[in-house]
C-alpha cells in the first residue's frame, strides 16, 4: 500500500521559540514523531511505500528528507515545498504526479499512531469494494473531522471541525484509486469547502459520495488512537508507553481475544429460536455483543470463528461487527475434532508473539477482564486460567491443580483433581505458546471424550517450562447463556424479559 503523509504545515502548538526542531522531528519517548508514525505503519504493512510532502526549510536545516529515506529504507518520495499552502488538501495535491493513478492510496496524518492493525483494516475495505473509507474513534470534540453513517455500515456524510456523530475520523483515509482522491479533492476545493480559510481532506469523502461511490469505515477504541497534536498529548503518550514498559509489555502486541462460536446451537433451534445462536437477542443486544462487552480490554483485537451459514444469515450484523476495527470474523464450514482444533483454524489471523485469550461464546462473568490479564502480566506468567472454587467437584468442568509457588502443576478435563474448576477463559502470554502446545497435544492424540479440548493444552506448555497461574472468581459471578433455560435465568438476573 502507498501512504501519502503531508507534514508541511507550521504548527502553533509547537512554537519554534520552545521547540528547536520542526514538529515531525520532535521526539516522542526518544523517537522522532514522524519516525514513530512510519514505524507503526511499516509494522502493520511491511510492503508500505510513502509519499511525504514537507517544508523545504526542514530538509535544508534538519535533513528531514534524509531521515525519511532512512526511516523507510528508501521506499519513499519526498516532495519539498518552498511556501505554505492553504491546508492539508492543498499540500497533498502538491504530490499529484506521484499519486494520480489507478493504484490505491492512503492519506494519513504524520503526528499519530493508531494502535490497531491498519493494514488489515485496509484489506477489509478492499474486500468490501469500498471506493473510499476512513478509520474512526469515539469523540465529540470539535477539533476533529466526523462522519455520519447509515444502517448498512457505510458513510453518508463527512464534515471537518463539525460534530456529526460520535465517530471522529482518526486521520486515516483510504481511496481505492489515487486518481479518485485527486479528483475529489480538487472538486471539494473548487466548491469552496474550507474551514477558516483552510482546505482539509474530509470534504473529499463527500465528493466521492456525491459521485455515487461507496464509502466505508472501521472503528477503533478511543485509547487506540494516539494523536500528538499538542505537547500535552505527547507527554500523555510517553506516560502511556512508560506504564506499559513498567508492566513488562512495552513490546507486546495487542491482546487477541479469540471466541469460537461455530456450534450448531441445536437446543435454541429446538426451542423455536430463528436466529443463529451467536446473534440471539440478550436484553437488546446480540449474544456475541454481550460476550465481547464482558471481555473488552482497551486495545484488544477480537477474532471470532463462526459457521459460514450463520454469517450468511446475518450479513448486516456481520458487516457492523467487521466495521469495528478491532474485530476479525473468520468463517468455518467444517466440523473439527474439538475446541482446540477450532481455535487452530484461526492461527493465520493471530500474531504469534502477541498475547492470546480464548473465551467461550455463551458465558458472562461479572469480573474485570483487564484485571485478569494485568495480574498475569505483573506476575510474569506464560499463561493464566480463570477458576472458581467448586465445593461440589462437578466433573462437567475442567480442573487445575497447583504445585510449587502457586503455579499450575497439572490440568485435567472432566476430572476433579482439586477444587479449582476452570471458568473457560484461557490466557497465554504469546499466541504461539498455545499454538505449539496444541500441536504437541494433537500429535500425541491426547483426547477427552474423543475431542481435543483447550484446557489440556496447558499440560504441554508446562512440560516445556511455561509458568501457568490461576485467577479466582466467585462462582456466583458466572452466568451461562448457552441454553434457552440458562439464557432465561440470566435475563431474570439482569432484569430483562425472559
Image (cartoon, helix red, strand yellow):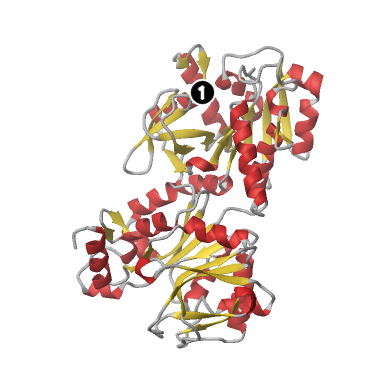
Q: Nearer the viewer, residue 383 or 122?
A: 383
**Residue 23 lies in quadrant:** top right
Position of residue 63 relative to residue 240, above or below, is above
Q: Position of residue 398 (x, y in %)?
A: 46, 80
Tally of numbered discs? 1
Q: Is residue 359 left or right of residue 36?
A: left
Q: Is residue 244 left or right of residue 395?
A: right
The residue tagged 1 is 185
The quarter of the rendered structure image containing the C terminus is: bottom left
Q: Nearer the viewer, residue 243 or 173?
A: 243
Who's the residue at 44% across and 15% down the image?
191
- Residue 74: x and y, percent? 78, 37
296 shown above or below 462: above
Where in the figure is residue 471, as x and y percent of width and height?
A: 51, 68
**Circle 1 residues within 10 Å: few <14, some 14–19, many ≥20:** many
426 horizontally vs 110: left or right: left
Q: Quadrant of residue 226?
A: top right
Of 468 and 161, the residue lying toward us: 468
Q: Is residue 44 left or right of residue 345?
A: right
Q: Quadrant of the N terminus?
A: top right
Q: Residue at x 52, y 22 (%)?
A: 200
Residue 256, image x and y in percent?
A: 54, 58
165 lies above or below 306? above
Residue 250 seen anywhere in this rendered image of the structure: no
- Splitting the image into 4 quarters, where does residue 231 fall? top right
User: Can you say whether 41 is above or below 483 in the image?
Assistant: above
Q: Do we see residue 98 in this rendering?
A: yes
- Mark 1 residue element: helix
Amino acid at each position: 500500500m502507498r501512504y501519502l503523509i503531508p507534514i508541511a504545515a507550521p504548527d502553533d502548538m509547537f512554537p519554534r521559540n520552545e521547540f528547536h526542531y520542526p514538529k515531525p522531528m520532535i521526539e516522542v519517548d526518544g523517537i522522532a514523531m514522524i519516525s514513530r508514525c512510519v514505524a507503526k505503519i511499516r509494522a502493520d504493512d511491511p510492503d508500505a511505500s510513502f509519499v511525504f510532502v514537507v517544508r523545504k526549510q526542514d530538509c535544508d536545516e534538519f535533513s528531514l528528507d534524509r531521515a525519511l529515506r532512512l526511516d523507510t529504507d528508501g521506499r519513499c518520495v519526498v516532495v519539498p515545498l518552498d511556501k505554505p499552502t492553504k491546508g492539508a488538501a492543498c499540500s497533498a495535491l502538491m504530490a499529484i504526479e506521484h499519486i494520480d493513478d489507478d493504484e490505491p492510496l492512503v492519506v494519513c496524518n504524520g503526528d499519530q499512531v493508531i494502535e490497531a492493525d491498519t493494514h488489515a483494516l485496509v484489506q477489509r475495505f478492499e474486500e468490501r469494494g469500498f471506493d473510499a473509507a476512513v478509520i474512526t474513534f469515539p469523540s465529540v470534540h470539535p477539533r476533529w473531522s466526523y462522519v455520519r453513517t447509515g444502517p448498512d455500515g457505510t458513510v453518508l456524510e463527512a464534515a471537518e471541525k463539525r460534530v456529526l456523530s460520535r465517530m471522529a475520523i482518526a486521520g486515516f483515509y483510504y481511496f481505492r484509486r489515487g486518481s479518485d482522491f485527486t479528483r475529489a479533492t480538487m472538486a471539494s476545493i473548487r466548491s469552496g469547502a474550507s474551514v477558516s480559510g483552510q482546505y482539509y481532506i474530509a470534504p473529499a469523502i463527500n465528493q466521492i459520495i456525491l459521485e455515487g461511490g461507496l464509502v466505508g469505515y472501521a472503528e477503533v477504541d478511543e485509547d487506540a488512537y494516539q494523536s500528538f497534536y499538542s505537547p500535552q498529548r505527547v507527554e500523555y503518550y510517553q506516560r502511556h508507553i512508560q506504564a506499559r514498559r513498567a508492566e513488562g509489555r512495552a513490546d507486546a502486541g495487542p491482546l487477541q481475544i479469540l471466541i469460537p462460536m461455530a456450534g450448531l446451537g441445536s437446543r435454541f433451534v429446538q426451542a423455536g429460536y430463528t436466529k443463529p445462536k451467536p446473534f440471539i437477542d440478550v436484553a437488546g443486544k446480540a449474544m456475541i455483543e454481550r460476550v465481547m462487552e464482558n471481555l473488552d480490554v482497551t486495545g484488544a483485537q477480537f477474532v471470532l470463528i463462526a459457521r459460514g451459514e450463520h454469517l450468511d444469515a446475518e450479513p448486516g450484523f456481520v458487516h457492523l461487527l467487521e466495521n469495528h476495527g478491532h474485530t476479525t470474523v473468520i468463517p468455518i464450514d467444517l466440523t473439527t475434532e474439538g475446541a482446540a482444533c477450532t481455535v487452530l483454524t484461526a492461527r493465520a489471523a493471530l500474531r504469534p508473539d502477541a498475547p492470546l485469550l480464548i473465551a467461550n461464546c455463551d458465558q458472562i462473568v461479572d469480573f474485570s477482564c483487564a484485571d485478569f490479564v494485568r495480574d498475569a502480566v505483573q506476575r510474569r506468567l506464560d499463561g493464566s486460567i480463570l477458576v472458581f472454587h467448586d465445593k461440589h467437584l462437578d466433573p462437567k468442568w475442567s480442573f487445575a491443580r497447583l504445585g510449587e509457588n502457586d503455579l499450575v502443576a497439572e490440568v485435567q478435563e472432566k476430572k476433579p483433581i482439586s477444587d479449582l474448576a476452570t471458568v473457560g477463559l484461557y490466557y497465554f502470554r504469546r499466541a504461539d505458546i498455545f499454538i505449539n502446545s496444541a500441536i504437541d497435544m494433537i500429535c500425541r492424540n491426547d483426547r477427552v471424550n474423543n475431542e481435543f479440548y483447550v484446557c489440556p493444552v496447558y499440560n504441554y506448555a508446562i512440560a516445556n517450562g511455561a509458568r501457568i497461574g490461576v485467577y479466582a472468581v466467585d462462582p456466583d459471578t458466572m452466568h451461562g447463556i448457552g441454553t434457552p433455560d440458562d439464557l432465561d435465568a440470566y435475563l431474570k438476573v439482569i432484569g430483562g424479559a425472559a
